[in-house]
Amino acid sequence: MLVASSSFYEIVVDELFQVIEKCLSVMAPDMARSDTVIVVGSYTIGKERLFVAAAQRYNVKIYVDNHKYFGHLSRSIALFLMSCVRRFNVIQCLNYPPEVNALFVRSPAQAKIHVVSMGHLSYAST
């Protein structure tokens, strides 16, 4: 049985917070712009610490796509939308305190941070 020491976990947590702080500093100029949305790619779960920290630091809201009506769409699009519903539900299951839950909104127009499927992100070819 492999047992990690508590100092290992302290190092990992410290490095995680350093990465989050670096990301927040990179986001800062764009957070000040009214014409910019921050897009965070996510699978079913992941990166919650980052987008919650950003919303708290910059006093903005988070939109997690959650489509309800997709029966008329193609199977691949419907499956993607169902994963979005799961993503929002997973976030709700994290038992955040009410002040963190209040950061999440259901309308993209209300949010500066949009959490989307990783499948929607790509680099533009030049």
Image (spheres, grey):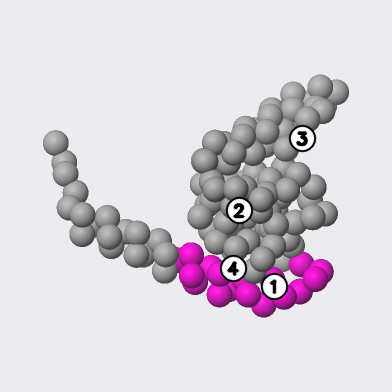
The location of residue 72, given as percent across then percent down, is 85, 23
All told, the count of numbered labels is 4
**Disc 3 from disc 4: Cα separation:** 28 Å
The three-letter code of the residue at mark 3 reads His
Give the quarter of the figure containing the N terminus.
top left
Sequence-first disc among 1 and 4? 1
Q: Give the dominant element type of the magenta stretch: helix, strand or loop.
A: helix
Judge the density around disc 3: few (<14), some (14-19), many (≥20) Cα neighbours within 10 Å: some
Q: Give the residue number, with chain letter if any, for mark 1.
A: 30
The three-letter code of the residue at mark 1 reads Asp
Question: Disc 2 on helix, strand or loop?
Answer: helix
* Dot in front, 4 or 2: 2
Residues rendered magenta in the picture: 19-36
Q: Give the residue number, with chain letter if any, for mark 4.
A: 57
The three-letter code of the residue at mark 4 reads Arg
Sequence-first disc among 3 and 1? 1
**Disc 3 from disc 1: Cα separation:** 27 Å
Q: Give the residue number, with chain letter if any, for mark 3.
A: 67
Question: Disc 1 on helix, strand or loop?
Answer: helix
Disc 3 vs disc 1: Cβ atoms closer than 8 Å? no
Q: Give the residue number, with chain letter if any, for mark 2.
A: 99
* Dot in front, 3 or 4: 4
* Dot in front, 2 or 3: 2
The location of residue 12, given as percent across then percent down, is 32, 59
Sequence-first disc among 2 and 1? 1
Q: Which mark is residue 44?
A: none
Front residue (pair 105, 3): 105
Disc 4 vs disc 2: Cβ atoms closer than 8 Å? no
Q: Is residue 31 magenta?
A: yes
